[in-house]
Image (cartoon, helix red, strand yellow):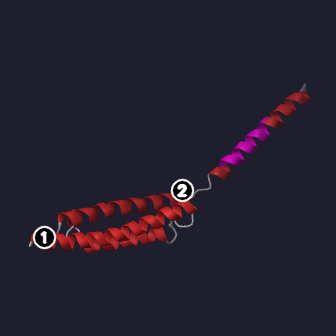
Amino acid sequence: MNLRLLLSVLLVGAAIGVLLFLLRMTQTVDGELHLQRLANLRTINNLDVDLNRSITQGGNAGSGGRDRSAITTDLGNAMAAIDSGPASLHGLSPMLDQALDTFLETIDNKFALGYDFELRTRNWSR
């Protein structure tokens, strides 16, 4: 009887050990780095909204009176942070790399279309 109890305790201990090992292996994400990446994405989103407002409202000032060149500079820096550097999203997975490349290309196209839109609306309003 004592042997059965000892064997049961050993099996329960081994099962708990395996569960703890598996739990530890699934939590290999650096929480601080993850939060920095999320902050970078949030920054890009906010700057993109500011740029949209700046372009569609005309003039050089964006939301909150920020200069469009400052918005553009900040957006470029934020995009560089997710493209390379310690908080880069590149290299995490092939699918993410492809999505990030598409996103960066889309933002570049948006700048070109924004300036084209600006030129056309300036010429139209004259």
Q: Secondary structure at mark 1?
A: helix
Q: Disc 1 or 2, which lies upstream in sequence?
A: 2
Q: Is residue 29 left or right of residue 13?
A: left
- The residue beneath circle 2 is 31
Q: Is residue 55 magenta?
A: no
Range of magenta residues: 12-23
Q: Is residue 24 left or right of residue 8?
A: left
Amino acid of disc 1: Trp
- The residue beneath circle 1 is 124
User: Of residues 23 and 1, which is closer to you in this image?
Assistant: 23
- Can residue 59 be seen in this snapshot? no
The reply to whether callout 1 and callout 2 are in contact (CB within 8 Å) is no
Compared with 61, 23 (above or below) is above
Disc 1 versus disc 2: distance between alpha carbons? Answer: 51 Å
Q: Quadrant of residue 103?
A: bottom left
Q: Is residue 22 magenta?
A: yes
**Residue 10 picture location, percent across and down:** 83, 37
Q: Quadrant of residue 45?
A: bottom left
Looking at the rendered image, the disc whose residue lies closer to the viewer, 1 or 2, is 1
Report the number of discs: 2
Amino acid of disc 2: Gly
Q: Is residue 81 left or right of residue 22?
A: left
Quadrant the N terminus occupies: top right
